Amino acid sequence: MMTREMVMELLATAGDDLSVWESSDGSRIDVTVEDFIGFDEDWDEIDRELDDEELVDSIKEQLEASALSISGNYYRYFEFDGFTVVWGYASFDI
């Protein structure tokens, strides 16, 4: 079983590909895959190529394998003992 500390260490390995926010009480960790940069002068979306897409996929797979339960179709909610990891993508917020 992964502890909160183990999850945070795992997420930190992705560098700039993931943004991580933890609630003050530690009950929720929000993870954003940084796959979107912004808009160009024509307001066309500019995607960001991940530095290590395989690592990001591996991190998500490890969370899936270790979670007590998983829910959500858009944002994924990984339930652990005492905390939840919410996995999403920057491109979701466009």
Image (cartoon, rainbow, N blue to C red):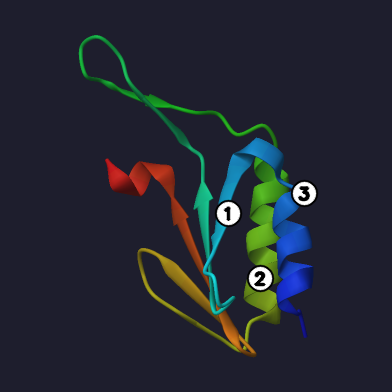
Q: CA distance from mark 1 to mark 3?
A: 11 Å
Q: Residues within 10 Å of mark 2 (few under 14, many from 20)?
A: many
Could you tell me which secondary element the residue under label 3 belongs to?
loop
Residue at which label 3 appears: 13
Give the quadrant of residue 17: top right
Query: Depth check: 22 or 10 in front?
Result: 22
Q: Residues within 10 Å of mark 3 (few under 14, many from 20)?
A: few
| Image coords of residue 11 (percent x, y) | 70, 56
In the image, residue 25 above or below residue 42: below
First along the sequence among labels 2 and 1 = 1
Judge left or right: residue 71 versus residue 26. left
Q: Residue at x 73, y 51 (%)?
A: 12
Residue at which label 2 appears: 63
Q: Residue at x 71, y 63 (%)?
A: 8
For marks 3 and 2, give the one nearer the viewer: 3
For marks 2 and 1, give the one nearer the viewer: 1
- Identified by mark 1, the residue type is Val
Query: Depth check: 49 or 1 in front?
Result: 1
Could you tell me which secondary element the residue under label 1 belongs to?
strand
For marks 1 and 3, give the one nearer the viewer: 1
- Identified by mark 2, the residue type is Leu
Quadrant where the image shows the C terminus? top left
